[in-house]
Image: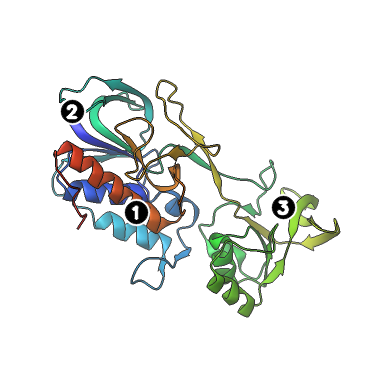
Amino acid sequence: MVKDILIIGCGSAGMYAWKMAADLKLTGDVVEAKDTYGGQVTTYYPEKYIYNFPAIPKIQGQEAMDAMFKSIKKENDDINLTYNTYVLEIKTIKPEEEKHINWFEVKFSNKEVKQYKRILFTDGMGVFKPIQLVDKLYDNIFYSITNMQEFKNQNVTIFGGGDSSLDWANELTSIAKSVTIVHRRNEFRAKPASIEEAKKNHVRFLTPYNFKEISEDDNDIVKKIKIIEIDSNQEVELEVDSIIVQFGSTIEKEKFENLDLKINKLNRFEVDQTMQTSVQGIYASGDCCIYETKIRNLISGVYESMQAVVNIEKIIKDRKAVNNGW
């Protein structure tokens, strides 16, 4: 049996794609390499508040993922979810319907082999790996946060200039002894409102500085670090209790050399306005895709999933126009 769609990844983008596909009566599967849903939100910041959900002033990451999961229609088995499973191989096969150029045969890590009319990568192109401050792993250098209470009464230094850095800084000011942000530029990518809030919360800003080295450590605990001012090369030494690094992530991608998939230097799929990749029939949404006007946040990933699924459904159901996604 050839199913309509394979959704790879069950983070926020994958869950919304699943919801849309179920609502539009498509058949298929969702595979998730981990043992739970929620993707990067569940893995890296379940306690962090999300501020860009429409009509919701703020909501914790895990609460948002739970709500998304509960919203999916699971009454029938038209679309099935499998955890601890990833894609090993994708082959193009000749379609049985003339309107399609490619169908796909997919081999999974659980040794199953299935066929699909369309494939949608969400955050499942590979393994997301946080960009590290140093190669060695220290007990008090954090790339993800699952328990904010670990930072109670501590001097916390945060590296990065995006929304995650500023959001964590503002969250931690209520429990930490002090919070310092180190950023390599004077300008921040974070929302201006978050920057203003951080200033009101007495967050210390050190810009433009780069990390230089760990100057003192003891039993895998960093005690002091050195940073360097970019313009003057002046060094500053900071005493730290904990360091949070928010440099973003790279993707350790799965290799599908037999497919002519165009990717950028960060291993993200290049897609068109329908979220289709360079291989007809393979789509991408969420953090694993890239296009000229791409905005990397949860809401844009949800939109991209809707765009992909309604265009997939248009082709499969032979519609003249896309479903509006209601």
Q: Which one is in front, 154 or 287?
A: 287
Query: Looking at the image, is mark 1 or mark 3 earlier in the sequence?
Result: 3
Q: Position of residue 179 (x, y in %)?
A: 66, 69
Q: Position of residue 29 (x, y in %)?
A: 25, 37
Query: Looking at the image, is mark 2 or mark 3 earlier in the sequence?
Result: 2
Q: Quadrant of the N terminus?
A: top left
Q: CA distance from mark 1 to mark 3?
A: 39 Å
Q: Amino acid at mark 3?
A: Ile
Tell whether 178 sits left or right of 252: right
Q: Position of residue 87 (x, y in %)?
A: 37, 30
Counting other residues with Cα less than 10 Å from the Cα at mark 2, is it few (<14), some (14-19), or many (20 or more)? some
Instruction: Write down the residue under mark 1.
Output: 302
Q: Which one is in front, 325 or 239?
A: 325
Instruction: Write down the residue under mark 2.
Output: 2
Disc marking residue 104: none
- Can residue 134 be seen here? The reply is yes
Instruction: Write down the residue under mark 3.
Output: 221
Asked if 184 appears above or below 175 in the picture, the reply is above
Asked if 117 appears above or below 289 in the picture, the reply is above
Q: CA distance from mark 2 to mark 3?
A: 53 Å
Helix, strand or loop status at disc 2: strand
Q: CA distance from mark 1 to mark 2?
A: 26 Å
Counting other residues with Cα less than 10 Å from the Cα at mark 3, is it few (<14), some (14-19), or many (20 or more)? some
Q: Amino acid at mark 1?
A: Val
Q: Amino acid at mark 2?
A: Val
Q: Quadrant of the C terminus?
A: bottom left
Are discs 2 and 3 less than 8 Å apart at CB?
no
Counting other residues with Cα less than 10 Å from the Cα at mark 1, is it few (<14), some (14-19), or many (20 or more)? many
**Extreme bottom residue here?**
200
